[in-house]
Amino acid sequence: MNSTNNTLCPLCGSSTNNTFIIGFDRVSPKKENFTYVKCKECNLVFLYPLPTDKEIKTFYDIDYGPHQYGNVDKVNDRHFSFINKFLINNYFHVQSNTTSKSRLKKYIAKKLSVFALKNLFAPYGKNRLLDVGCGNGLWLYQHLKLGWHAEGVEMNADACKKATDLGLNIYQGTIYDVPLTNKYDIITFNHVIEHVLDPLETLSQAKKLLAPNGLIVMLLPNIDSYGFKKFSNCWFPLDPPRHIIQFSPETIRHLIDKVGLNVKDIHTIPKARFMIKSRIYKKYLSNDFININDLTKRRTLIEECLKKGKKQTFESKIYKKIMIFYSYFLNKNSGEILKVTAQNNETSSNM
């Protein structure tokens, strides 16, 4: 199948692709389906046709989860629990190198960090952090409390307001609205890169904002996961049309190579929660769901899935335990999430 000029592969520019899968919007049910194609040249999976910028803005409802207020009190309480306070004082806080007098405590805290506060960064470089698509800013706020120079960029005006209310410096817009005079030791894309039309240009712009030896860290769905192979278009992280591009370890590595960064690490993270949600959609949606043209019926079926997901039946509890065991012990190489770390190899003493 040949694509038109506005549906060239966002990674390699090829005009040749094959239909990969047909999905549906589980968040805001619509009459139409969404087709993903797979590039014949580089194997990238992407929406066909690619949406316009105007269309993308309609994909996010006013109550889109990441744009809502976060629970600041819960975050503060989390940081003051006994074990987490020990980790912060001896490893995570930017002042831990000076406040932690004991090498043993620091060593123990580093080892324990793989089990607690896993989504936070330990001090790195000059501790300058930029979160692209920061949403309500709650994750950034945690780093602000740890002494980081933490900034974000977010398109949604309401989310920007929520983030600035936390004391954060937020640029409203895209990564192109962050001044190039700024330099960061870590730039994060937490479930963001799959939402953009131009991942190559976006990462190239991020590279310009990196300090020497700086890192780009990304979390994103893994289209090569066991979950996708098992649940197909009911796989929870597929999420069309918001997820414009579906990456695999192969294609995300290709993207990083084209940008000119060094791939430091790529690994998958199992998510039992995603497997459980996917199973509900697979079990309760009819096999011909994508052939249903009645919007009311589509909405009713999706709502029923949401209700089923909230009920804690004996069956669901057993399945949850099985999936947790499977995810953490048997599914390490084909988990639902990719965690990717890329490094800027340029060196300079001026940044």
Image (cartoon, grey):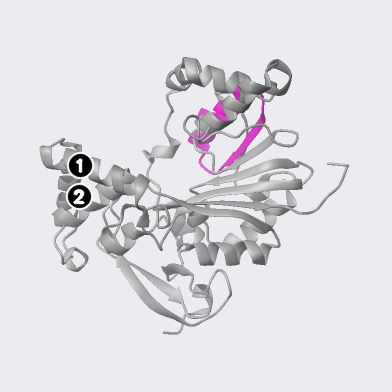
Query: In which quadrant of the rendered image does the C terminus lie?
Result: top right
**Residue 240's quadrant in the figure?**
bottom left
Residue wearing tag 2: 280
Determine the CA span between mark 2 and mark 1. 7 Å
* Residue 270 visible at all: yes
Could you tell me which residue is drawn at 50 percent across and 21 percent down? 84
Vertical position of residue 124 compared to residue 301: above or below: above
Relative depth, front residue between 116 and 34: 116
- Disc 2: CA contacts within 10 A as few (<14), some (14-19) or many (>=20): many
- Please check the rendered image and state whether residue 2 is part of the magenta-colored stretch, yes or no: no
Relative depth, front residue between 68 and 128: 128
| Mark 2 element type | helix
Q: Amino acid at mark 2?
A: Ile
Vertical position of residue 94 compared to residue 66: above or below: above
Specify the segment rendered in magenta: 140-163
**Residue 29 in the figure: left or right of residue 316:** right
Question: Pointer 2 and pointer 1: residues touching (CB < 8 Å)?
Answer: yes
Q: Find the residue positioned furthest to the right.
A: 349
Image location (x, y in percent) of residue 94? 68, 25
Q: Find the residue positioned furthest to the front.
A: 104
